[in-house]
Amino acid sequence: MNALTLQWHDAHQNKTQHIYEQQQSKNSGTVRIGRDPLRCDIVLTHPTVSGLHVEIFFHSQQQRFYIRNLRESNPAQIDGKSLIQGEVILNKGSIIYLGQQQLQVTEISINSIPATVLVPPQQPPAQPVYHHHKKSLPTQPKPVYGLQCSRCHKVSPPENLQVGCPWCGTSLAAAASVLVAPKN
């Protein structure tokens, strides 16, 4: 199982938290960090940390853990660089500052390449059209890939990566890439 380990010092205690690829969380597919216990999976107490500060997720195609800033007015610092928008890869030893709170990635465990999931088409296949002229050799359809939502498990086209799942609104950033069965 793909996992990332974070360590930090909070309220006079050393804390350790493991983040897993398919971990149950308040926002499916990501683990959110901040001060707000209603929106965050990892709750920090330092007053310079935003209520909802960052989220960490596993990108199944890249086989890497990423961090995304969620508060432009209080950007996270990753390895000495401000992360205002977008996401950045986390590595073993990465230092994360959320306000003045320091967290460190102490371990990353990545398994081998995940299996490709074959998903049947979501719409019934079209009826074949028959022609009365000379037959040509059948051509193999090109493989079609989609993004499988981690919450509702429906498959969206890759164009929805930036928009999110059209059915439930979940971010597709950490969605599994699946091979969609060709329509016959």
Image (cartoon, rainbow, N blue to C red):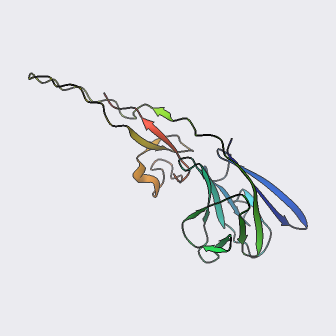
Most foreground residue, 179 or 36? 179
Total marks shown come to 0
Q: Percent x, y for residue 133?
A: 8, 23
- Left or right: 79 as drawn, with respect to 141: right
Pinpoint residue 156: horizontal percent, then vertical percent.
43, 45
Q: Residue furthest right?
A: 12
In the foreground, 152 or 61: 61
Quarter of the image for residue 150 reads top right
Question: Quick one: quadrant of the N terminus?
Answer: top right
> At 65% from the left edge and 41% from the top edge, which residue is drawn?
111
Side of 88 where 120 appears, left or right: left
* Residue sitting at x 65%, y 46%: 21
Q: Is residue 5 above or below residue 152?
A: below
Q: Position of residue 122 (x, y in %)?
A: 40, 35
Residue 68 image-quadrant placement: bottom right
46 displayed left or right of 30: right
Quarter of the rendering occupied by the C terminus: top left
Vertical position of residue 11 compared to residue 106: above or below: below
The residue nearer to you, when weighing 40 against 181, is 181
Who's the residue at 77% across and 75% down the image? 47
Residue 12 rendering spot, x and y as whole percentages: 91, 67
Is residue 112 shown left or right of residue 105? left
Q: Residue at x 57, y 63 (%)?
A: 87
